Image (cartoon, rainbow, N blue to C red):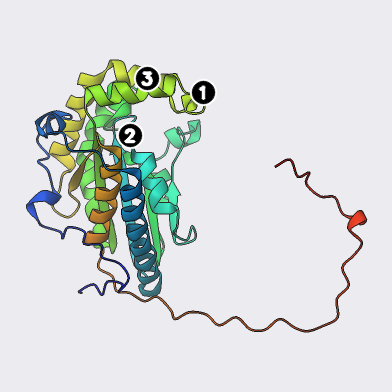
Amino acid sequence: MAKARSTDSDVTPRRRGTPASRPSASSSDGSTEAAEPRRKALTRRRFETELLKLQRELVIMQEYVKANGLRVVVIFEGRDGAGKGGVIKRIAERTNPRVCRVAALPAPTEREKTQWYFQRYVQHLPAAGEIVLFDRSWYNRAGIERVMGFCSEREYEEFMRSCPEFERMLVRSGIQLIKYWFSISDDEQERRFQARVHDPMRRWKLSPMDLEARARWVAYSRAKDEMFRYTDIKVAPWYVVQADDKRRARLNCIAHLLSLVDYEDLTPPPIELPPRADDAYVRPPLEEQTFVPQVY
């Protein structure tokens, strides 16, 4: 189905299947950034202008998803500090949280550890007319659990066998599954971690697990390569987002997401507000109410 793009937007996200849409899944994490020439940074003004255009398209897309009962799952994985949360925040910023919601699961409880591994994720999958953004997902087992030793070798091997089948089952059920890996270089991650260390308002983003992961960079790279080898499947491929340039990563990812979901502009016409009822109303005395102090 061809998209009928809104008349007040000149957004032109890349179409699915173009060579630029999928960097090689076989390259180890960080190698793509090292090979990329450094581009001139986007100004904040241009970034915000382009972001607003994309967010307008996201609102149009969500209306189509809701009206046609589509089910969309978007997975965001990658290095700590690669910018997954920033992209998710920009996607959810202007969309309807009842249509487009974020699933960011905490560590499993003792009870959940005894369940089928995918069980706690299944309950967060979308119903008709919903989009779910997974801020990390079942791929925790192939990444952090594998590297940190939180799962056994048998559990890891079973995940690698069952994950592709699980995802094929989701696709067969009618879910559109989109997977993004945010790739960041060693030097850029170090810079962002240092910025968090010295900024009290961002220090909460650094957990002991993040620091341990930082020390195991090579192990995570190997785990990611192995994960891609098993789970980069035709019906649900991995799309790599080069994330050293944070602003470009956000714009490129959102534009690419829009290009993967077939939608039309179903924006309703402007609403005419009915006149207020002209009934007599007397407001209670202000002294009977408690107001917030006007500090500012």
The residue wearing badge 3 is: 194
Residue 251 appears in the figure: yes
Q: Name the element at disc 1.
A: loop
Q: Name the element at disc 2.
A: helix
The residue wearing badge 1 is: 200
Identified by mark 1, the residue type is: Pro
Q: Position of residue 254 (x, y in %)?
A: 29, 53
* Earlier sequence position, callout 1 versus callout 2: 2
Measure the C-alpha gap from mark 1 to mark 2.
28 Å
Identified by mark 2, the residue type is: Asn
Residue at the image point whose x is 28% and y is 64% from the top? 174
Residue at the image point whose x is 34% and y is 26% from the top? 192
The label nearer to you, 3 versus 2, is: 3
* Earlier sequence position, callout 3 versus callout 1: 3
Identified by mark 3, the residue type is: Gln
Tell me the quarter of the image containing the C terminus. top right
Left or right for 288, reference 96: right
The residue wearing badge 2 is: 140
